[in-house]
Amino acid sequence: VITFCNTLSAREGLIPVYSVNGTVISVIWSANGYRLPTEAEWEYAARGGADAPFQLKYSGSNTIDEVAWYSGNSGGKGHNVGEKGRNFLGIYDMSGNVWEWCWDWYSSNYYTSAGQTNPRGPTSGTVRVARGGAYDSPGRHCRVSQRFTWNPTHRDRFVGFRLARSR
């Protein structure tokens, strides 16, 4: 994913976000290239942004079958993006279909009672966060609030990514 983001950024004349030195990957937050969203950015987009009229359990609905492919309706396979409903920002498939990598390292105290504006999570860790659930997930794993983790080298048919870009 890191190589893909940097290659796409360079191809479009943008400043790559990731600096790679062996196995150490750093983020250049001031760069304008493509990157993985932070966990906070992912959740903000999944919830429909600041102007969403209300909080929903899934991205775009409280009824999972309207917006997500999951173990109860997917037939055991992924589906093309956009076959289900979208959320308030017009984004499809943020609940179900495939888990989506976030840049953040996992922290059990990521969400605190203190107000936060666009937090970026810990600077180190052992597992990265994935959000959204997948076509093989039970419905409860497709909730906007659901968090999951994997080793950053994990690969599987039900794990994907969505790109972000700062301007």
Image (cartoon, rainbow, N blue to C red):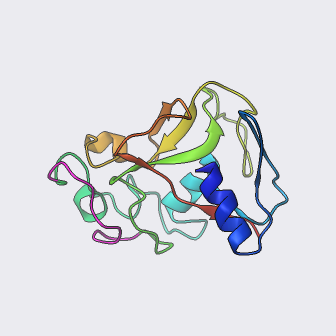
Start and end of the magenta stretch? 75-86
Front-most of 7 and 71? 7
The residue that appears at 61% across and 66% down in the rendered structure is 50
Q: Is residue 9 above or below residue 153?
A: below
- Magenta region, mostly helix, strand or loop? loop
The residue that appears at 67% across and 26% down in the rendered structure is 125
> In the drawing, does residue 123 fall left or right of residue 159?
right
Which residue appears farthest toward the right when viewing the image? Answer: 30
Is 138 magenta? The answer is no
Q: Quadrant of the C terminus?
A: bottom right
Q: Is residue 167 above or below residue 18?
A: below
Camera sees residue 36: no
Front-most of 18 and 40? 18
Camera sees residue 85: yes
Q: Is residue 14 above or below residue 113?
A: below
Q: Is residue 146 above or below residue 61?
A: above
Looking at the picture, how far across and down is residue 23, in whole percent? Answer: 71, 33
Looking at the picture, how far across and down is residue 60, in whole percent? Answer: 39, 64
